[in-house]
Image: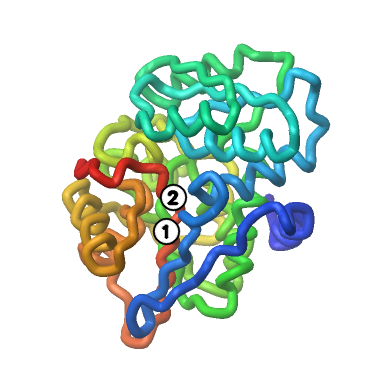
Amino acid sequence: MITLADVEAADRRIDGRIRRTPLVEAEPDRWFKLEYLQHAGSFKTRGMMNKILNSAVPAAGIVVASGGNAGLAAAYAARELRVPAEVFVPVTAPAVKVAKLGKLGARVVQVGNEYAEAYAAARERTDALFCHAYDDPDMVAGNGTLGLEIADEADTVLVAVGGGGLVAGVIAALRDRAKIVAVEPVNCRALNAALANGGPIDVPVAGVAADSLGARRAGEIAFELAADAGIESVLVEDDAIIEARRRLWDDYRIVVEHGTAAAYAALTSGAYRPAAGERVITLLCGANTDPGDQG
């Protein structure tokens, strides 16, 4: 099981290669962690840097399957660390993400209509280091370094969940210091279903946040940590996600992905209701989106 010691080791390893992103108070007892300002636009750069730095990378470089953000993180980290990168994405991946992958120097292969199909194609590459987008110890530990940066401020942390690589890292970093709430769309509820089932199972994937939260099955690491820590899991409707994204722009001039807005939707929709005086941090974890896309 990934522990705080693993997260702290990752923090030392990637120090100087990632941004320590701002934590801002939006209103009394409500904070935003602005992780969308991370290199390549999402938290996944932390995990990908840790994965590559802690691995023996073959001459063929790295390969990753991604709905978009893990690919962008892989492309950025590979460029900075001077290794080749090949990224498999679904044909449904947002054009803004595909274009940015090319700009970062990765070879892009578009396969299938969802992450699972891109993943299957990527696993056929055997000469490169496969970097799992979320179910990998080094990825989880690297992602968890975000938690170390908010450890002194949070009573509760709201985390949008796809495959679970971020929430797993946050659990490893903060399980003894803060309440962690996993937030998923009703149409992409891989971790919620896993917790109800007693283990990861395949779920249907659809809706406005499927490009970034559309894992068909939660990672084993995320399930193990979430079940062991007994974290809270809540679901939000697509309409609530769209409204939360709009409010982030209208009220704070923050532009994020629909998947990122899911975490904030837990508050704005009432899916999670904090107690009086409860200090709540919403992780705004990714912004690789078209600002004009209203869902």
- Residue with the mark numbered 1: 284
User: x, y percentage for residue 201?
Assistant: 43, 33
Q: Can residue 27 be seen in this view?
A: yes
Q: Can residue 227 be seen in this view?
A: no
- Residue with the mark numbered 2: 286
Residue at the image position 32 percent from the left and 76 percent from the top: 274
Asked where in the image residue 272 lies, by quadrant, the reply is bottom left
Residue at the image position 71 percent from the left and 20 percent from the top: 128
Foreground residue, 56 or 252?
252
28 lies above or below 82: below
User: x, y percentage for residue 230?
Assistant: 49, 61
Q: Do the residues labelled 2 and 1 touch (CB within 8 Å)?
A: yes
Foreground residue, 90 or 75?
75
> Residue extending furthest front?
103
Label 2, secondary structure: give it.
loop
Foreground residue, 192 or 117?
117
| Other-residue count near label 2 (Cα within 10 Å), few / some / many at <14 / 14–19 / ≥20 | many
Foreground residue, 33 or 147?
33
Identify the amino acid type marked 1: Leu
Marks counted in the figure total 2
